[in-house]
Image (tube, helix red, strand yellow):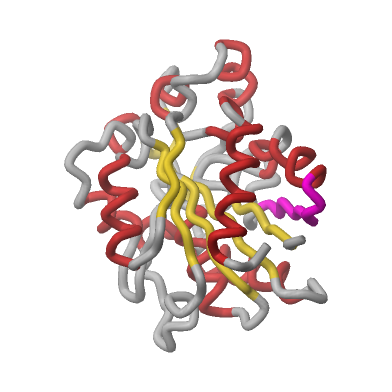
Amino acid sequence: MATLILVHGAWHGPWCWERLVPLLEAKGHTVLTPALPGHDQTDGAPATTTLEDYGRAIASAAGRESEQVVLVGHSMGGAVITQAAALSSNVAGLIYLAAFVPEHGDSIAELAGAAAADELSERVDMTPDGGRTVIQDGASSEVFYADCTPEDQAWANARLIPQPIQPITESLEDPEGRAAALPALGIICTQDRAVHPDLQRDMCDARGMPTLDMTTSHSPFLSAPQDLAEKLAQALDQMGVS
């Protein structure tokens, strides 16, 4: 069985994995859900937070495990797990869930700019400090949680926090190609309105990784946790790291 580190995306925190964790543990996996730096604070991470800060935090979590880990990154978390893998020798594989898949020199902002359609970037506002963004009122229900119940939408919306801009605009640093050399797989959410499904697939194709599809919006850990647990088990088997 695998040790999985689940890495949340922008504006989110470890709370988003609550329904998924027991399902994965029931399959015999060890599951860790660390908060990215500052994402355990109700007022959010400071504007000075960087992609390297995120990557080093997850690399450190991986390094504390006695066996190699599989990193699962959702949305922005795809860039984080890639950066973490570039900094760690204790990663066995990478799973990208509705995620950005940067290569050395890429930034999330540049990858998002290549999308044919982008419903997310027009639905965020800058905070007064000028270095963070927040989701506009009501937008997250449509963009992140379109296939969730109204109750689940309200529960998740209440937990979103400001997101620093630097991890979005900074380029991934993997000069030795350490992350690029690892087994990897993408899970495409085909009804996604935050990271366009075509962009998800294009990024996975550019990386040369296989993909699995889920007919969900951006947050299957809320709308379809059982199906997501099965997809992750399938991904681990397919990657040969289960």
**Horizontal and vertical percent for residue 114?**
19, 52
**Does the segment drawn in magenta span residue 28?**
yes
Nearer-the-camera pick, 240 or 44:
240
**Horizontal and vertical percent for residue 19?**
71, 33
**Residue at figure coordinates x 33%, y 63% from the top left:** 107
Question: Extreme bottom residue here?
Answer: 176
- Indicate the quadrant containing the C terminus: top left, top right, bottom left or bottom right: bottom right
- Asked whether residue 127 appears in the rendered view, the answer is no
**Horizontal and vertical percent for residue 220?**
54, 33
Q: Is residue 112 left or right of residue 186?
A: left
Is the residue 129 above or below the residue 203 in the image?
Answer: above
- Asked whether residue 137 appears in the rendered view, the answer is yes
Quarter of the image for residue 94 reads bottom right
**Residue at figure coordinates x 64%, y 50% from the top left:** 233
Q: Main secondary structure of the magenta part?
A: loop
- Indicate the quadrant containing the N terminus: top left, top right, bottom left or bottom right: bottom right
**Horizontal and vertical percent for residue 77?**
51, 54
Total numbered circles = 0
**Residue at figure coordinates x 40%, y 86% from the top left:** 175
- Provide the residue span drawn in magenta: 27-35
Is the residue 33 above or below the residue 125 in the image?
Answer: below
Is the residue 23 above or below the residue 144 in the image?
Answer: below
Q: Is residue 75 left or right of residue 237?
A: left
**Does the segment drawn in magenta span residue 178?**
no
Quarter of the image for residue 149 reads top right
**Residue at figure coordinates x 68%, y 52% from the top left:** 35
Quarter of the image for residue 202 reads bottom left
Nearer-the-camera pick, 124 or 31:
31
